[in-house]
Image (cartoon, rainbow, N blue to C red):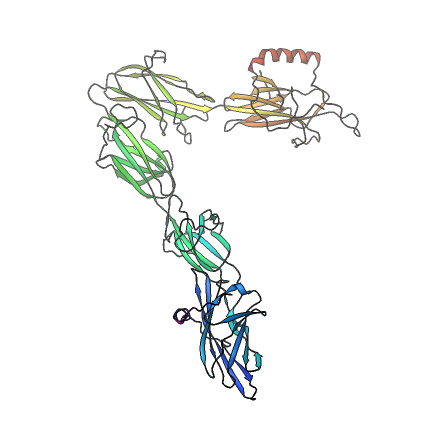
Amino acid sequence: MKNRFLGCVLFSIVCLSYSIATAHDIIEISTTGSNGHTSIHIFEYIGVTYNYESKTSTWCYKVTSGTSPSLSHWNLILPDCFIEENVLQSNEVVEWVDKNGIKFDQGYQDGESRTVCFTTDNLYPVKSNSLYVIAKASTSEVTSTDLITGPDCYVNGSITAFKFEDIDQDKVQSADEEPLSGWEMTLYSGSNCQTGEEIGPPVNTDANGNALFDNLAPGEYSVKETLQSGWGASTSLCQNITLQPEQPATITFGNYQLPGSITALKYWDEDANGVRDINEIGISDWEMQLYEGHGCNDQNATTTIMTTNGDGIATFSDLSPSEYSIREIIPPDEGWVAVNGTCRDVTLGRGESVQVEFGNQLVIGEIKGRIEVLKFYDLNGDEIQDDGEQDLPGWTMKLYSGSGCVTEPYLQEAETGLDGTVAFINLAPGTYSVQEVLQDGWEATNGTCKDVIIPQEPENQTVTISFGNRELRSITALKFYDDNLDGVKQIDEEVIEQWPITLYEGEACDGEPLQQLSTDENGVALFENLSPGTYSIQEFVPDDWETSTSVCQTISIVENSADILFGNRKEITDPNGPPPPLPVPTMSHLGLTVFALLAGGLGALAVRRKGASPFKKGPAK
């Protein structure tokens, strides 16, 4: 232990912050001298001062000696957790004694009072009525019967960073303001979240909005939140906190969602290429309307209509995260036409600012006509866009001179916009044709080429045409050996390959088959590129096999593709014995002849599943 004198000036400052005395902050010890005289010595706990920078604590006591005999020395017995190295210094001569005690070995005059302080190496908590004092006067050494306040062993504390959505930004969590999970919090040693002072990795808030940092010694800390995009902070991003001994602490972070905005830019698209070039100016005094949801559906129109400014900009502000759409309102009878559609869909995130652009061309003079093409998802194949059948963006359309889409090279090519439309403008009167470029996995419900006539009169006439399309479907038939004949494929039931499966249009497996396949090595027969509709699938079943599923199954693939199962088992001749080995399916001579003819005629249509199969393959039984 270092016996360094700290000086009265230091301790006059340190000991100013003292605790208010409690019941045994003052104790008395009586000693009897050799002359038989009794002397009373007074020990008073003054207080403790914590230095959070150095993480030390200084403890001060006032000691008043009795008379005849006066104190020759006194001991303060510390808790068992203390060792000599925990006591750093004192303003008096001290000695460490075996019983975890500090011996203040500087004698007193009769009636003398002194303030005695010592410093420990950590921020130990205060414990009332916890320590014994031993007083030595003359030949008498007495241990106190009362206990005095002093340092105690400390238990590491914790800091909880709590995060909530502060909707009203008042920094206080209200009943309707929920905790926020998944927010990153970082703990720092010392104040102000200094880089390089991080303690461990960041911690994310849990479902209750809490990020816990535990096993912390008392001291000065700071916690910083990582602000997420689209959010603002109602409290400081970095917050300082003093962790007291044995006292868990909580700091609160409030956040609120930033409003988003959508900017509509209106410009004069002189070359009608759908892209704003550097020399193409904005158009002012153009109305833009905001809709809730995609598609500019009139039922979701808001009352918010903005007018573009001198730069062609109209901004919709203070928007919550959601789906929106913006439609331009084209002034009538002014000769303006939309180059790439009149509606734009926007999915707006928290605090996002999104810009959409609308290009228009002014049709004047000898420019006579315009062809507007609408592309839509024709789910029911009736060639008409019904309610609920959505527009299809990103489809390529080609414009040809003359009919039949055959005159090469084509005149123009463009893609449908978010509202499923594209326009070919500045067209002289005459005959044209428009061809859609069919995408893989789709079919046309009303043709892929349409002829259009732009008449001489009236001028600036717009002709509208539409193309309907729908996705092709598939049916996956899985063939398996159904050991328990329950109609459900178990994980240990193996698939069967080279089993004939036949596809029919309509129900009941009636009429001419559309296609026949044999199951592949994964037990799968895959019928692809089918128009949405109702089909039936039939399996071939040899005479000595049992079925656990219907031999003919009807299935609809209007909305989605579909999977079906065919389960079979070889007939068991001996109920007490195992089934015989699983053979390749056989047919009668007549059936084999018919099957061979069908397989030869339809083999070219067979489509095999590509890639890995999720089904288990097994050897024949």
Q: Quadrant of residue 484?
A: top right
Q: Which quadrant is the C terminus positioned in?
A: top right
Q: How many marks?
A: 0
x and y percentages locating residue 471 in the rendered image: 47, 24
Identify which residue is drawn at 23% across, 18% down.
Answer: 457
**Is 293 located above or below residue 595 in the figure?**
below
Q: Quadrant of residue 493?
A: top right
x and y percentages locating residue 537 in the rendered image: 59, 22
Q: Which residues are magenta?
A: 1-8
Observer-nearest of 115 and 250: 115
x and y percentages locating residue 439 in the rendered image: 43, 21
**Is 396 located above or below residue 267 in the figure?**
above
Identify which residue is drawn at 49% across, 85% down.
Answer: 67
Observer-nearest of 123 and 365: 123
Q: Residue 234 vs residue 542: left or right? A: left
Q: Is residue 379 visible?
A: yes
Q: Residue 419 vs residue 23: left or right? A: left
Taken as a whole, is the magenta stretch helix, strand or loop? loop
**Is 171 located above or below residue 441 in the figure?**
below
Q: Is residue 176 visible?
A: no
x and y percentages locating residue 278 in the rendered image: 25, 28
Whether 468 is among the magenta residues is no
